[in-house]
Amino acid sequence: MSTIPRGAAIVGWGKCLPPAVLTNADIATFLDTSDEWIASRTGIRERRVSHVPLGELMYVAAARALACAGVDGRTIELIVCGTTSYDDQAPNVASGIQRRIGAEGCAAMDVNTACTSFLYSLSTATAMIKSGVVKNALVTGGEVISPFIDWTDRNIAVLFGDGAAAVVLQATDREEGLLAEKLGCYGESREILRVHGMGAAYAHQNRVIGRTEWQFEGQEIFKKAVHGMALACGEALAKLGKTSAVVDLVVPHQANMRIIEAVARKTGVPMEKVFTNVHRYGNMSAATIPVALCEALEENRVKPGALLLMPSFGAGLTFTGHVVRWGERLTPLGTSPVELPDSNRSALDIITKYRAIKAA
Ligand code: UT7
């Protein structure tokens, strides 16, 4: 292979979903809402709540992705972790993954663009491989967002869930992996989704850091999200001289079924070519697309050489459209023995302490 490769192929993938399930009916035990309202407005039936920190979920996902790729973690040269939630502000989560996979001394960074963080991370890692800085990379997308939810606000509490997934990228001379993308942000709309109480700014406001209050204009987010994603998909495809007619499968950000349907309509792709799992997990922010990619592979929705389109949006308001060429292999080369620590705690039990922080 030449020094400067043509592509960064996705050669491994793995997901990690915490076991505790929070159903719509569970939420209706403490908020004025119903399964009917949530399912009809969002498509969500249930979501997961993590009993462990983000680093644990991402590590398990990473171990599975490495085993799938048949790659020894010690050979990884770059780790990019896409996330908005964090175990610690410092050090970052990527350095923890580096230590646990044994990739001593490799580059390790976190990327935060809210729900689009995995896609911005994929762009960053692919660009570094294509420019010859590194030959491979581990890219994760994950969130443990349940501690930051305002569990007294029905506008928010029904929408989000926890989870993580990872992919392994490898330099290749084939035209594979991320072929083209559009990354964007409507900064003038940054106030339509703002989580008060998550950062240092609140130390100056006599607020308790961790006691969150969400500024959230659902309908504005909806409109901007659809507009941004359709625009990004069009621009990314145009860079390749292609139209949506040649897309084999859309793997979109899973925030709301109605948003996904609107983007598919605007992009000119029939729903049969769109993968959805929002009913199972809700909006896992940075984790939605890599988890959906893993499940699309498990469910035989990805064919060898398929052209995939990945639209996403998040707070900022960031938006993206990625065009990915899949390789030939659809099955993992190996499996990992790594598992999450056992837990039989219910989701309602886990969120009890987060609800108490708000009430205090
Ligand atoms: O990654 C970014 C994540 N953000 C998003 O994905 C948000 C995008 N926006 C949306 O998904 C939708 O705007 C929502 C699902 C958030 C809301 O759907 P909507 O169709 O825009 O509903 P709405 O905000 O217009 O609310 C309709 C009614 C309101 O009652 P009134 O004022 O008509 O009496 C709300 O108070 O539904 C009420 N409502 C609820 N009712 C039961 C809001 N949340 C709930 C709830 N259960 N959980």
Image (cartoon, rainbow, N blue to C red):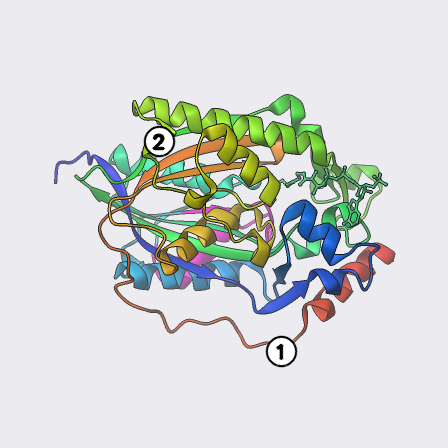
Picture quadrant of residue 323: top left
Residue depicted at 82% across the width and 38% down the height = 205
Residue depicted at 76% across the width and 64% down the height = 353
From the viewer's perspective, tell me whether residue 314 is left or right of residue 181: right
**Above or below, 20 relative to 294:** below
Which residue appears farthest toward the left when viewing the image? 1
- Which type of secondary structure does the marked residue at label 2 adopt? helix
Residue 112 x, y percent position in the rendering: 54, 40
Look at the image and tell me in which quarter the C terminus lies: bottom right
In the rendered image, residue 103 lying in the magenta stretch gets the answer yes
Span highlighted in magenta in the image: 80-104
Q: Amino acid at mark 1?
A: Asn
Residue receiving disc 1: 344
Residue 190 x, y percent position in the rendering: 66, 28
Look at the image and tell me in which quarter the N terminus lies: top left
Q: Residues within 10 Å of mark 2 (few under 14, many from 20)?
A: few
User: Closer to the camera, 67 or 229?
Assistant: 229
Q: Amino acid at mark 2?
A: Ala
